[in-house]
Image (tube, rainbow, N blue to C red):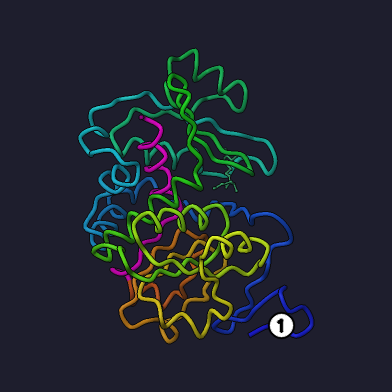
Amino acid sequence: MRNKEHPLKEVRVSGRLMKRPKEGDAMTRLTEKDIFGLEESMGQSDLKLTKATGLTIRKLASLAAGITEEEFCLRSRKVAVIPITSGEGIIPYFTDSVRSIISYLGYPAEVMSTNDVAGIYEAVTDGKEIIFMADDQRFIAFNLRTKTIVDNGEATARGYVAALNSMSGGLNSQKVLVVGAGEVGRTAIFCLRELGANVEVYEINPQKVANLEKIGIKVIKDIESSLQNFQYILDASPQAAFLDLANLHPEVMIAAPGIPLGLTPETYLSLEKRVVHDPLQIGVATMLALAII
Ligand code: 2YJ
């Protein structure tokens, strides 16, 4: 359904308006609430992931990065997480959460005691090999020795595609809907195609999908009536609570990197083992697996 006055400005799905971002990619900024308690619940979230996908977070990140779990475990790089104050500034618990995910994966990680440039200085002089840091535009892992630089958006897409692939038992020749063609959605589309999936995309901003259409990716115009046709969905949109059980395929499986969660709370509860969603863990774990190479 389209808004009559501004046909492309917003659409209504499951009773909610999906707003089109003004320009460029809508950058999701994590909030303190999204990540509060993450450190204490790493074991629990890993268990939840394993129930849905059959993979631990370490195995999932290894698969997503194209390395074996043994390779992941064998390497030990000292990791620094640097708080960055620019733009909107520090997000409470952010660096501690990143550090706790890396530590959970068995790598020695430390949050630097100083911020920004001083933090980089501290990391390098302390012999750290990989640094993690985020401002309002980018969240990166940088391997100081190999010069490998990993972007969180790309890593997140790879991680969630690996999760959906495992949860589904293999996506080769399967139809997959990607919602949102921002940095995560676009990378996901290409990773899914590499796996042999038939990818279709829904994106509220037509400019973002024009190039995708040119390379033969089907663009869905009306998401509400299309949802039921897809057993596999990757929701990389920043839209909250538009995926409702009533509109979904009865055996739907959803990988949902988007923040906030696109599923309504009731739908999330009832689909728990068929949904993969977290605020930071899969993205950071895959960043690490890609950065150690
Ligand atoms: O160090 C801090 O506490 C802050 N500077 C963290 C900022 C985290 N950045 C974001 O959430 C941005 N929106 C960028 C994320 C890019 C994800 N692909």
Residue bearing the label numbered 1: 3
Quadrant where the C terminus is found in the figure: top left
Q: Quadrant of the N terminus?
A: bottom right
Q: How many marks?
A: 1
Seen from the viewer's position, the closer of residues 133 and 255 is 255
286 up-or-down from 220: above or below = above
The residue segment tinted magenta is: 272-293
Amino acid type indicated by mark 1:
Asn
Taking the image in four quarters, ligand 1 sits in the one at top right
Horizontal and vertical percent position of residue 181: 56, 60
Point 56% across, 22% down: residue: 120
Residue 117: quadrant of the picture: top right
* Residue 290 lies in the magenta stretch: yes
Percent x, y of residue 106? 28, 34
Q: Is residue 115 left or right of residue 254?
A: right
Horizontal side, residue 102 vs residue 182: left or right: left
Ligand 1 neighbours mark 1 (CB distance < 8 Å): no
